[in-house]
Image (cartoon, rainbow, N blue to C red):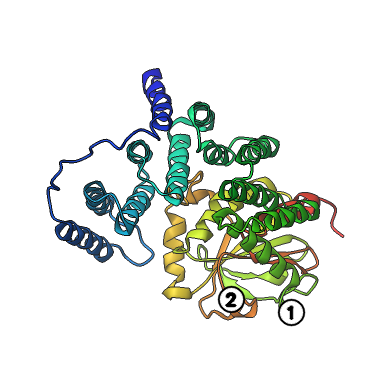
Amino acid sequence: MNSLSLWRALAACVALVAALHAPLAQAQSDEPAASQETLIAAMDAARQALVDATPRGGTSPPELLSAYADACTTYADSFPQGDRAVMARSTVLSCLARMDEPQRVIDTVDRWMAADLLTPAEFDRALNMRTLAAVKLHGPDAALTEIDRAIAAAQTRQVRLLLVRSGIEGQSIEQRLATIEQAISLAGEAGGLRADALGAKAMLLIEQGGDANLEQAQSLVEQAQALGVQSANVLRAQMQLRSRAAALAGVGDIAPGKAAPVFALNDIHTGHEVKLERLRGKIVLLDFWATWCGPCVSLMDSFLVDLHRDFKDKDLVILGVGTNWRGETAEMQLAWAEAKDEPVIRGGNHTRGECSWIKVHDAAGAVTQTYGVQGIPFCVLIDREGRIVYAGNGHALKGDILKYVQEHAGSARN
């Protein structure tokens, strides 16, 4: 990318935040080009065309995603107020994310923010998406520079910008925590902003795992709850804490310290039988997943690929167990995995070819049922003796799994 393009990207964010409190510019003529009913019908038609052309578990045609985004944009520009406009803008962002068009995300969000139409919830999501798009286009360092300029120009929404900054990749945990502490300090006694900042810090501590971090996270959640306001960050932190507590408590035979039920399933690539008991002496991570499950592929992109790369030669075996939920078949999972140059998740960091661990398919659903899996991604960490260490929501257990593997993988076998 040339220096002019980078300058324009950086300058756009500064102008964006400076304009947040400017009067709403006239974005369209006084008389809409089409009636509200006509525009709603156009959105519905574009949506139906997209649904009809998208196979279950498959990829939506980019041109139909673009057409749906255009129809929703036209409606939101013509009738920018009200719940339907909020839904239209949300749909636009969802379509753009699936299309993997970061520059279009940036241009769209900048225009909406300059018009100062977004609700607080819309603002947070749009700003997060814009920052991810900037990271993808320019890299983490340039995105950090851009958002730092925006923070310097910001006023009432400075806390929101700091919280987004804390989530940009390429920073140490200490740097991210320092940014969140700054946000907490600037939030003062403002209930909603303070709760969001406390929740963000709690989630970061949960991500790191460890008893001390989790105790502090629980304390932060309680402080935020005492403010008596609703916060998405606090709700997410609560859910993660509950998921982890449930994993540590276990249910029946699927609990820490219990013997992991053995099974045999076929490798989707080779057709060879894979027996769990033959992996005794290794640290094994079972990952129950499906191709259509967004959180499953997100876990792969954000955690499992790096974990596999760093510890596959140190006695860690990741075993992906494909579920048969929603009619998922081994053929569908094999087709997903064999598209090696495709991204694991749109806008993500890795390709499917990097998900090179063993994958089996639970066609009968017996293994999924035996392990008490009620939602995916569901991860089960098994020690060298075949005992369960953790079993529960994969995202909630990332910090604990990483800590255990770091301490035990590559060490002498007991």
The quadrant in which residue 267 appears is bottom right
Looking at the rendered structure, the kind of residue marked 2 is: Thr
Q: Is residue 24 above or below residue 328?
A: above
Q: Nearer the viewer, residue 39 or 286?
A: 39
Q: Residues within 10 Å of mark 2 (few under 14, many from 20)?
A: many
Residue at the far right in the pictured view: 414
Q: Which residue is mark 2?
A: 368
Q: Is residue 413 visible?
A: yes
Quadrant into which the N terminus falls: top left
Q: Which residue is mark 1?
A: 253
Q: Nearer the viewer, residue 303 or 105?
A: 105
Q: How many marks?
A: 2
Q: Is residue 215 above or below residue 158?
A: below
Residue ID at (26%, 52%): 72
Give the CA distance from mark 1 to mark 2. 14 Å
Residue 359 has which mark? Answer: none
Residue ID at (28%, 64%): 51
Counting from the top left corner in percent of width and height, residue 92 is at: 32, 50
Counting from the top left corner in percent of width and height, residue 339 is at: 42, 53
Counting from the top left corner in percent of width and height, residue 359 is at: 56, 63
Q: Nearer the viewer, residue 362 or 23?
A: 23
Residue ID at (87%, 60%): 414
Looking at the rendered structure, the kind of residue marked 1 is: Asp
Q: Earlier in the sequence, mark 1 or mark 2?
A: 1
Q: Residues within 10 Å of mark 1 (few under 14, many from 20)?
A: some
Name the element at disc 2.
helix
Name the element at disc 1.
loop
Q: Is residue 342 visible?
A: no
Counting from the top left corner in percent of width and height, residue 236 is at: 59, 58
Residue at the far top in the pictured view: 3
